Amino acid sequence: MSGLVEALRRAIGDAQVLTGPDAAPYEQEQRRRWPGQALAVARPGSTAEVAAVLRLAAAHGASVVPQGGNTGLVGGGVPDATGRQLVLSLTRMNRVRGIDAANLTMTAEAGCVLQALQAAARAQGLLFPLSLAAEGSCTIGGNLATNAGGTQVLRYGNTRELCLGLEVVTAQGEVWSGLSGLRKDNTGYDLRDLFIGSEGTLGVITAATLKLYPQPVATLTALAACPSLEACVALLMRARARLGAGLTAFEVMNRLALALVARHFPQCAQPLPGAAWTVLLEQSDGESEAHARALFEGLLEAALEDGVVLDAAVAGSLAQSKALWQLRESIPQAQSAEGQNIKHDIALPVSAIPGFVATTDAALAAAFPGAALVNFGHLGDGNLHYNVQAPPGMAPAEFIARHEAAVNRIVYDAVDARGGSISAEHGIGHLKRDELAARKSPVALGLMRAVKQALDPQGLLNPGRVLGP
């Protein structure tokens, strides 16, 4: 494969083809569970250079692993250990190509960091609403490749719903330019939706046209302590009825999740006493802050009177609102500080979540006494991050090696029994590939394989991810 590396250097420049120690930052994801070794890392700076890289890879029969900000959690963006896979980093493709304020759209390259896109929209008095904990380092190409969700799915939808058009380089090195700002286009199959969520296995996303929204006049954030998960669901139903489309976020955190934040980030103030469950909810209003506050406070006062909420705190300033969100967004970092854990990113009908948590908590407690259940996530759209940490006295790595399969079986069987999904927003990658094969219907798997064969007949794009050999 040395001939490929030299050809890549001629095509995109010596400095943009990394090998050896220079490639190391691209060879391991943040959870450090799947260390790999790349043949090389190619860092193209344009769509034409991406196409050139893919043509050369196809000519040499080399597999390609597309990579954005490398913030994924399922091992989908790092090479395997063979030393024969080419990492294709999109981080140099980081330009906002244009904002059409009248059409409420923005066209940006795949390597743009999400936070930079939020800022670009804000500078025009507009809103790009995708928001997640890794927004300071994740890229929009990776967000699209995994159909990322985040904290405002309840109001604005997943990344798929925020995308109107794509530019994609195929496995053969051809460019499909579908950067349309149209909201209505029924001219044949929706190719855009094939590539969104495909995790780099069907083509390489190089740019996207994204939806923008007017900035809300007022945004209010609150914490509410609830006695049970059933009470959280009851509060969600009331919030939907009272706030309507103004309800933009509804997050839940169990007692242990916030206890971990208190342990590892004591500087994060927690304004409410500990409760079984704590809700973080946000309302955006297009009328006025006074109108928003009246609706918000009325909702919480009624819930307090009825015992649905035990205590509540409404942010009185932007700084206080950021502090409340910091509690929620610090949970993954607190878990990392505590040690590796068995992660689950599951989706269920909201009505099924309390029953799922009660029965699955009990099953895991019986099977693995002392295991810590860290449960948090986006209750408003039915997505929980249901994570299991090692019991006291057992090293996290040992717990994962010995018990991950059994823990997953308990959790995923309970998810299947309630019509849920084993992946809500993190993707399949390497971590869940075998689970997908075991749990997805043969018809669905057959259709997926047919699409893969049609678009990537050599099997060179991110092999071994999503679908097995």
Image (cartoon, grey):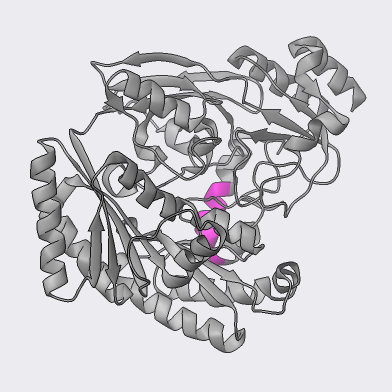
Instruction: For residue 217, say whether it is visible.
Output: yes
429 vs 229, nearest the viewer: 229
Q: Is residue 301 left or right of residue 29?
A: left
Quadrant for the N terminus, please: top right
Q: Quadrant of residue 28?
A: top right
Q: Residue furthest right?
A: 2
* Image point (65%, 19%), residue name: 50
Q: Against 146, is 354 above or below? A: below
Where residue 367 appears, as percent x and y from the top left, is: 60, 86
Q: Is residue 261 left or right of residue 355?
A: right
286 vs 448, nearest the viewer: 286
Report the span colored magenta: 439-448
133 vs 356, nearest the viewer: 133
Where residue 62 appears, as percent x and y from the top left, is: 79, 32
Majority secondary structure in the magenta region = helix
* Image point (48%, 45%), residue name: 133
